[in-house]
Amino acid sequence: MVADAARHYALSMAAEIERKFLLPEPPHWPPSSSQIQIEQGYVAVGKEGEVRLRRAGEQRLLTVKHGEGEVREEVEVDLDEGQFEALWPLTESRRLRKVRHLVPLGSGLDAEVDVYEDGLEGLVTAEVEFGSKAQSADFQSPAWLGEEVTGDARYANRNLVLHGRPGCLASAKTGSNGGVSRAYRLKTKETPPAGMRRIALGRVDSAMDRLAGDGDEDFAVAIHGSRKDLKKLRALLRLIRKELGEELFQAENRSYRDAGRLLAGSRDAEVRLETLRALRSRYGAELTGDAAERWEEALERKRNEMTAAADESTGEIEEAVQTIEAGRGRISEWPLKTDSWKLVAPGLATAYAKGRRAMKRTLTDPSAENVHEWRKRAKDLWYQLRIVREAWPGLLEAAADQAHELTDLLGDHHDLAVLREDLASRDGDTQKTFEPLMLRRQEELLDSALELGRRLYAEKPKAFRRRLKRYWLAWRHA
């Protein structure tokens, strides 16, 4: 039986000693160079190794690699066409294409220069393999090889597949120069699993950039933007909850929720102040005495104290950054394999149904808790419709805009509920002045929200799901 197996594949094991370089552009190929088209995909990727399939000319290989840096362990298995084709679907959403040029360097060494294609277009790397560590140490690289990136995990093929081309975050919003787009939507030319990972990484990187102070935003705006990024990420997690499995979903959702809470303090103080100022602007003619001015001054002092405390003690922000960064490394390991409507259908249907039920509860009992719950569920629907809006841009963008307007109305209602909690600690004159105005404004907001909600949630959940399925199938199979 072993002999029979040996006739079907050859097994090789070796310690691989390589150095990698980043080329600014493809060199002028010498006449002695050769080239081959390579496609490779990853069956499994972990922190310490990978299982990879490669199609290079007539060769079909299954490769297992362990370790990083200059020296790695490698096992290769030759496959026949049938074996390769049976395994290839397991690499869906984790594939790349490149043209490899074999360039002689002299002294028995060659440079394998890879010119990447598709989403990695513009990236050129070269690897030189050595027979020993001593030979590697003595190697003097020619200038055209460019910067050495040996051991830089960003340029490992498995990370290029999962995270895209590094070094292009400045242009990531537009996706230019080969950068990985941070667009919060699935794109037509990407598989749903790959798109979900890209969108998740985009929110994580955006949050971390803001917390690192990489933009022009002031501190309060950066904190608010980071929290919004985390909320969008959690809405995505709910969209793919069934595919992730309940245990993994709960762990990831809890991690990003806790990171958001670490950033909440100074932002909450800012919201209370903004809400009071909006009330004063709306009802200024009805306000007499100095109660409003005294309350605003008190809230402003509290806001400044909390902002100063956050500026002086970066512990909570550092903890949030560490939590978010740790989560980033796990995104590549999410078990997303379903390349169909079934990946997003359960999450979309759940968001819609829960929002519809929350609206009905609010209609029966318009308590602050019910309104806030409805807002959260409407936000899930808003974010998730944005993710799938390419399925029918006109209709789904309009629906997403409606959901956004609804969340703004419910958000203003919630902000007033939070401000009313603070009002309870104020003097009698302030309470007497503001309580009726705040109740009136909440009633106006809720009336507008219910009117909009009846239109947004007009369909029954099953009809909503069937309609979006038709859009999806027409889009993905066009």
Image: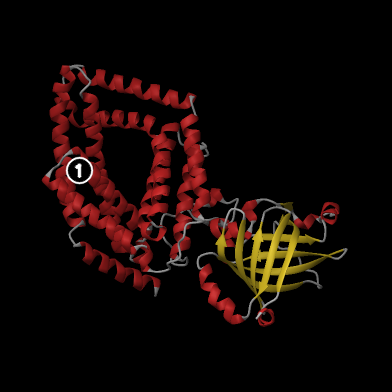
239 or 451: which is nearer to us?
Answer: 239
Percent x, y of residue 21:
72, 56
The number of discs equals 1
329 or 178: which is nearer to us?
Answer: 329
Q: Is residue 225 left or right of residue 368?
A: right
Percent x, y of residue 370:
20, 43
Q: Quadrant of the C terminus?
A: bottom left
Percent x, y of residue 440:
13, 34
Give the vertical position of 233 relative to 196 (above or below). Answer: above
Give the vertical position of 303 relative to 469 (above or below). Answer: above
Give the vertical position of 31 relative to 136 (above or below). Answer: below
Q: Is residue 176 left or right of residue 269?
A: right
Disc 1 designates what residue?
A: 370
Q: Is residue 471 left or right of residue 187?
A: left
Q: Secondary structure at mark 1?
A: helix
Q: Residue furthest right?
A: 107
Q: Residue at x 14, y 42 (%)?
A: 366
Q: Residue at x 16, y 39 (%)?
A: 367
Give the vertical position of 220 relative to 375 (above or below). Answer: above
Q: Residue at x 44, y 23 (%)?
A: 308
Q: Is residue 122 visible?
A: yes
Q: Quadrant of the N terminus?
A: bottom right
Q: Residue at x 41, y 54 (%)?
A: 184
